[in-house]
Image: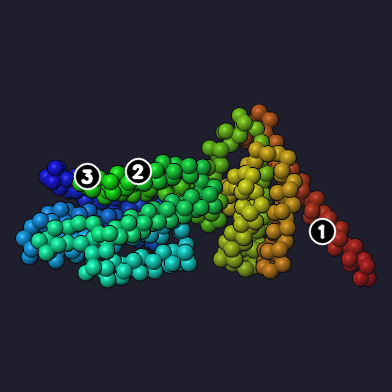
Amino acid sequence: MNGYFYVLTIIDLFVLGFMCILTKLSESLNYKQKRGFFCAFILIAAVSVLEVITLAVDGAPPGYRWLNIVSNYLGFGLSPGVAVCLVYVLDKKTAIRRELRIAIYCEIVYLIFLAVSVPSGLVFSVSAENIYSRGPYFYIYVFMYFVAIMYLSISTIITAKEFQNRSRGLIYPLIFFLTSETIIQVTLPNLHVTWLCVTLLSILYFIYCNEMWTQLDSLTGLLNQNSYLNRTAEMKRTGGVLIVFDVDDFKNVNDQYGHLKGDICLSEIADCIKKAYAKLGYCYRIGGDEFCVLMKNVDQQENCLKKFIELLEEKRSRLDFLPTVSFGSCVFSGEDILTIKDRADQNMYRFKKGKKENDEHGQKAKNTYCR
């Protein structure tokens, strides 16, 4: 059994090394995300090796007792850190979120507690004869491990929901898989399958996150054009409404304030669209300053539009460079998406033209009044 376990561990380390190379070569990950995956893969590899060491030295001459203690301490102590590393890669922003800082502090406190508890054998103990055994408070390790899994799971679900990831339901089988495996390992400690399963989970998680990020527009966090094209094929069959948005005089924003303010402008408008429509539809950036929403519930578009206008006006009161937005819509009625999009664009341009004419009439009336 031990020889079989050693062979599996070698395979495990090879796979983790391959994943590190794949992460380094990835074009879809930023530096922060690569660093998070590197840390997770290295931690898994380290704990896998530590498990091999504990298995090898347990019951060996007492001179190896220190190695048995250190290996078990690091193995139990670093295990929850894998989930923290994977949470770190979820957010593409460079700053570390407050919740993640708290998780890191909890991991540090847990490591300190574990170190202090080693002499008393609360979580685990190694006898004078160099025999490992679980302590009376071994459940503290199990609790920390499960809390870390739940933290990773909840963070992933929230992130996937925020970015409107359609495959977010896949995270539930991953949670069930790891939870079931952990329960089996705790019940049958001689199996030694935990870190082999964690390696498999980390690979699936890497694939899941990459799939989620490839659906997104990097600047605004909305779904991208490819996601839009895939979704419209379904909407043609199921029905719904397409709503298009176009930023008025966006070129003037770039020319007058610079492209950095232009990017902020797009991000702020995208935020308004997401807050107004995300609960009832899918939000996309399909061009430079062009956005759209696909909704199934046609009756709710007026309420969503009203909320969008309120949100946009509130932002414009604070950001003087933020322009207005024109919009138009068209209901799916069996035609291909190009026809639906063209009709929505025509309605949007009519709205834009009418708004411009009203502004011109208002300015003329103002000038006449002043004279």
In the rendering, at what x and y percent does residue 146 appear?
A: 37, 53
Kindly identify which residue carries mark 1.
359
Kindly identify which residue carries mark 3.
191
Q: Is mark 3 on a helix, strand or loop?
A: helix
C-alpha distance separating marks 3 and 2? 14 Å
Kindly identify which residue carries mark 2.
180
Image point 54% across, 45% down: which residue? 225
Total marks placed: 3
Between discs 1 and 2, the one toward the N terminus: 2
Judge left or right: residue 141 versus residue 316.
Answer: left
Q: In this view, does 185 lie above or below 92?
A: above
Q: Quadrant of the N terminus?
A: top left
In this view, the residue farthest toward the front is 136
Between discs 3 and 1, the one toward the N terminus: 3
Q: In this view, does 197 lie above or below 270?
A: above
Q: Quadrant of the C terminus?
A: bottom right
In the rendering, at what x and y percent does residue 90 appear?
A: 44, 56
